[in-house]
Image (cartoon, rainbow, N blue to C red):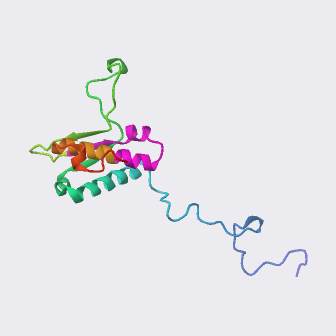
């Protein structure tokens, strides 16, 4: 037996990431924080929450399609030169039902996000936009669609 070779261990040592004796690393984020939710998903959730609040009072909204698009489409303007000088970017749009398609309400994500600083402001603005578009679709005042409209 050659004494110049070190003895072989029976089992390889398991690798651990325990640097500096501080223990194993914990989770990257607490469990209540959704890591996989994108900004678009979070925005869709805000719209869905707003619609759910309104459907309790207006059950006919279950037949309306609610959509989220990033930005409004500008028909007929192919370049920046064709845009009017001062334009107002819409936050939402309501389209009445036709024989082939149900009524639709669209909320535009980027214009709403640009006008808000945090999630609470965004939730309030999303709800206002949804209420305004529902009111336009139903031919009512926003205050009659949601009595708390404009009070937040």
Q: Residue 128: say if magenta.
A: no
Q: Nearer the viewer, residue 108 or 12?
A: 108
Residue 120 pos. (x, y %)? 44, 50
Could you tell whether 6 is left or right of 113 in the image? right
Q: Nearer the viewer, residue 17 or 69?
A: 69
- Residue name at image x 28 percent, y 57 percent: 52
- Residue name at image x 31 percent, y 23 percent: 78
- Residues shaded magenta: 104-126
Q: Is residue 6 above or below residue 25?
A: below
Residue 133 pos. (x, y %)? 24, 43
Q: Is residue 41 above or below residue 89?
A: below
Magenta stretch secondary structure, dominant: helix
Q: Nearer the viewer, residue 56 or 110?
A: 56
Q: Is residue 56 above or below residue 106?
A: below
Residue 136 pos. (x, y %)? 20, 41
The quarter of the picture where residue 109 lies is top left
**Number of callouts:** 0
- Residue name at image x 42 percent, y 41 percent: 113
Q: Quadrant of the N terminus?
A: bottom right
Q: Is residue 114 above or below residue 23?
A: above
């Amino acid at each position: 037996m050659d004494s110049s070779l070190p003895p072989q261990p029976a089992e390889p040592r398991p690798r651990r990431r325990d640097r500096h004796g501080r223990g194993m690393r914990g989770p990257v984020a607490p469990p209540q924080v959704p890591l996989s939710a994108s900004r678009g998903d979070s925005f869709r959730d805000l719209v869905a929450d707003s619609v759910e609040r309104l459907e309790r009072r207006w059950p006919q909204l279950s037949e309306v399609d609610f959509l989220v698009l990033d930005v409004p489409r500008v028909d007929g303007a192919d370049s920046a030169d064709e845009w009017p000088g001062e334009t107002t970017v819409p936050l939402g749009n309501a389209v009445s039902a036709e024989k082939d398609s149900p009524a639709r309400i669209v909320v535009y994500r980027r214009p709403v996000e640009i006008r808000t600083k945090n999630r609470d402001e965004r939730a309030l603005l999303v709800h206002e936009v949804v209420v305004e578009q529902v009111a336009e679709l139903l031919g009512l005042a926003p205050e009659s669609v949601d009595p708390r409209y404009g009070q937040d």
